[in-house]
């Protein structure tokens, strides 16, 4: 087998569990990438990374050449993995807050909570860019077809907090968004021990280079998910 392109979506992604398994996080997210790049030989590697490589000190979207300064073990392991790529050949795709109509991600969690007659609490002091997995996948394919290399941020347009995202899903589901209570990160720290950036929206300054337009808004991505649910 001699592929032209290897797309690496494998990672240890349990952000909070990584805090107590630094070795495991770095083995998969950093050393694993080194092995993969070595095994890829002449194949181009397209590797997925995360907004959690940033520390959240910015107040406007992070661009591709902003310095990484991870707060968490997960973020540090992903930042270490990024360094294993061959910048002139491979493509580093950073994305954020990935969601889809499938089970097992933030969208289905919010949907389930709205379906229950219980209060919902989401943090208001972490702001980022929710991104539809389908949009991310389409863009990765477009970048592969363009033979893109270097670093690019791929996220839906705009920004919101987890609280804002939950409210938007509530409205799209025909539920009362006022049910979503705003809490801050310190109130959620017991459940989510890993430090997360207060601000990690992603922007891109290299879209033009690859002939790409910005992705649709995160609000439209929420509508797309709910529409898929409604179609059964
Ligand atoms: N989800 C997000 O919000 C988000 C945001 C930004 C970036 N990303 C990045 O996007 C990529 C995909 O994330 P995801 O959310 O799809 O993660 P995910 O649902 O946790 O999937 C990760 C995959 O990696 C596999 N994997 C883990 N350890 C492995 C190992 N040692 N060897 C081989 N495969 C292994 C897992 O296989 P098993 O299921 O068999 O364990 C799983 O299929 C990751 O690089 C992540 O850092 C995700």
Image (tube, grey):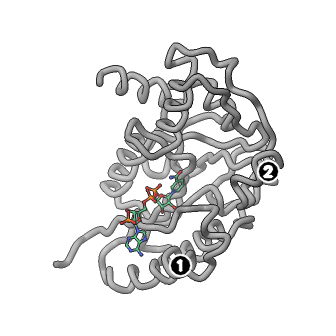
**Could you tell me how far apart the alpha carbons at marks 2 and 1 are, in whole angstroms?**
25 Å
- Vertical relation: 47 (above or below) 108: below
Question: At 46% across and 39% down in the image, what residue appears?
Answer: 132
Q: Is residue 232 left or right of residue 87?
A: left
- Vertical relation: 71 (above or below) 84: above
Give how far across and how far down residue 143 sits, in percent.
38, 54
Q: Which mark is residue 30?
A: 1
- Vertical relation: 94 (above or below) 179: below
Count all numbered tags in the image, as a single digit. Answer: 2
Which residue, as the protein is rendered here, is positioned at the far left?
Answer: 1
SS class, disc 1: helix
User: Mark 2 touching mark 1, by CB under 8 A?
Assistant: no
Give how far across and how far down residue 157 sits, in percent.
57, 35
- Vertical relation: 10 (above or below) 209: below
Give how far across and how far down residue 229 sits, in percent.
37, 26
- Dividing the picture into quadrants, the one containing residue 39 is bottom left
Q: Which numbered disc flags the more N-terminal residue, 2 or 1?
A: 1
Q: Nearer the viewer, residue 3 or 113?
A: 113
Question: At 81% across and 45% down in the image, what residue appears?
Answer: 187
SS class, disc 2: loop
Q: Is residue 115 left or right of residue 75?
A: left
Q: Nearer the viewer, residue 163 or 192?
A: 192
Quarter of the picture containing the N terminus is: bottom left
Q: Is residue 67 left or right of residue 223?
A: right
Q: Which mark is residue 58?
A: 2
- Dividing the picture into quadrants, the one containing residue 17 is bottom right
Quarter of the picture containing the C terminus is: top left
Q: Nearer the viewer, residue 86 or 177?
A: 177
Q: Residue 214, can we see it?
A: no
């Amino acid at each position: 087998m001699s592929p032209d392109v290897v797309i690496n979506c494998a990672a240890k992604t349990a952000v909070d569990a990584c805090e107590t398994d630094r070795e495991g996080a770095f083995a998969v997210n950093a050393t694993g990438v080194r092995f993969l790049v070595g095994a890829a030989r002449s194949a181009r590697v397209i590797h997925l990374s995360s907004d959690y490589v940033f520390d959240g000190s910015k107040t406007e979207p992070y661009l591709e050449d902003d310095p990484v300064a991870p707060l968490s073990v997960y973020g540090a392991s992903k930042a270490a993995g990024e360094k294993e790529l061959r910048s002139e050949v491979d493509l580093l795709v950073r994305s954020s807050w990935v969601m889809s109509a499938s089970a097992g991600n933030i969208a289905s969690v919010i949907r389930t909570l709205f379906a229950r007659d219980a209060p919902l609490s989401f943090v208001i002091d972490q702001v980022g860019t929710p991104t539809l997995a389908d949009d991310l996948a389409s863009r990765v394919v477009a970048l592969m077809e363009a033979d893109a290399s270097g670093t690019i941020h791929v996220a839906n347009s705009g920004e919101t907090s987890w609280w804002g995202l939950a409210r938007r899903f509530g409205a799209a589901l025909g539920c009362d968004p006022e049910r979503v209570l705003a809490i801050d990160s310190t109130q959620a720290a017991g459940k989510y021990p890993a430090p997360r950036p207060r601000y990690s929206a992603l922007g891109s300054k290299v879209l033009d280079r690859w002939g790409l337009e910005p992705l649709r808004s995160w609000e439209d991505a929420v509508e797309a998910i709910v529409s898929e649910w409604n179609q059964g």
